[in-house]
Image: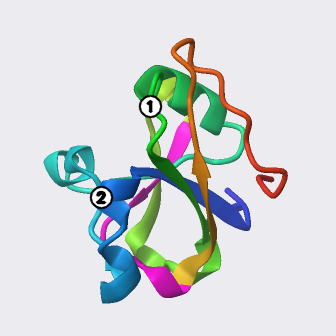
Amino acid sequence: MHAPEFIYKIATEAAFAPARSTGTFPGMPVDAKDGYMHFSTAAQLPDTLRLHFAGQDDLVLVAVRTAHLGDALKWEASRGGDLFPHLYAALPLSAVAWEKHISVSASGACDLPEAVR
């Protein structure tokens, strides 16, 4: 599989804020529970937002350069058999290209930044 240039992490502002001073993001509670950090590709983002973040407005969408993650990034079958990016390490902020605040409506709709590709 050819990895895309970017994958995306969705986090609450409260969970992500400390990473800006420490330089690493350990993930959300679900990541700690599952043993790896969940990411989505650009194509997977709309369903991930709808299924897991509907009605939330305190979110940060983080674009991460896949080339900076090394062997800790694995592509594994998940929802519907689709291959999802999973990171078996904390996220180094040096791999982050950009972050944007987003809100998801109660129906799960979200206007994604134009930079999502």
Please tell me whether residue 50 is drawn above or below residue 94 in the rendered image. above
Q: Are marks 2 and 1 in contact (CB under 8 Å)?
A: no
Classed neighbour count for the residue bearing mark 1: other residues with Cα under 10 Å, few (<14), some (14–19), many (≥20):
some
User: Does the segment drawn in magenta span residue 15?
Assistant: no
Q: Mark number for residue 82?
A: none
Q: Position of residue 35 (x, y in %)?
A: 20, 54
Please tell me whether residue 108 is drawn above or below residue 52 in the rendered image. above
As drawn, the residue found furthest toward the right would be: 114
**Relative side of 45 to 12, left or right:** right
Tell me if I can see residue 68 in this picture. yes
Q: Position of residue 50 (x, y in %)?
A: 54, 22
Q: Which residue is denoted by mark 2 in the rendering?
A: 15
Q: Position of residue 85 (x, y in %)?
A: 50, 53
Q: Position of residue 8 (x, y in %)?
A: 58, 55
Tell me if I can see residue 90 in this picture. no
Q: Residue at x 47, y 46 (%)?
A: 59
Mark 2 or mark 1, earlier in chain: 2
Tell me where the magenta segment starts and ends, as one range: 83-94
Q: Nearer the viewer, residue 79 or 102?
A: 102
The colour scheme is rainbow
Which amino acid, mark 1?
A: Gln
Q: How many marks?
A: 2
Q: Mark number for residue 56?
A: 1
Which amino acid, mark 2?
A: Ala
Please tell me whether residue 44 is drawn above or below residue 62 in the rendered image. above
Mark 1, secondary structure of its residue = loop
User: Does the segment drawn in magenta span residue 92?
Assistant: yes
Please tell me whether residue 33 is drawn above or below residue 67 in the rendered image. above
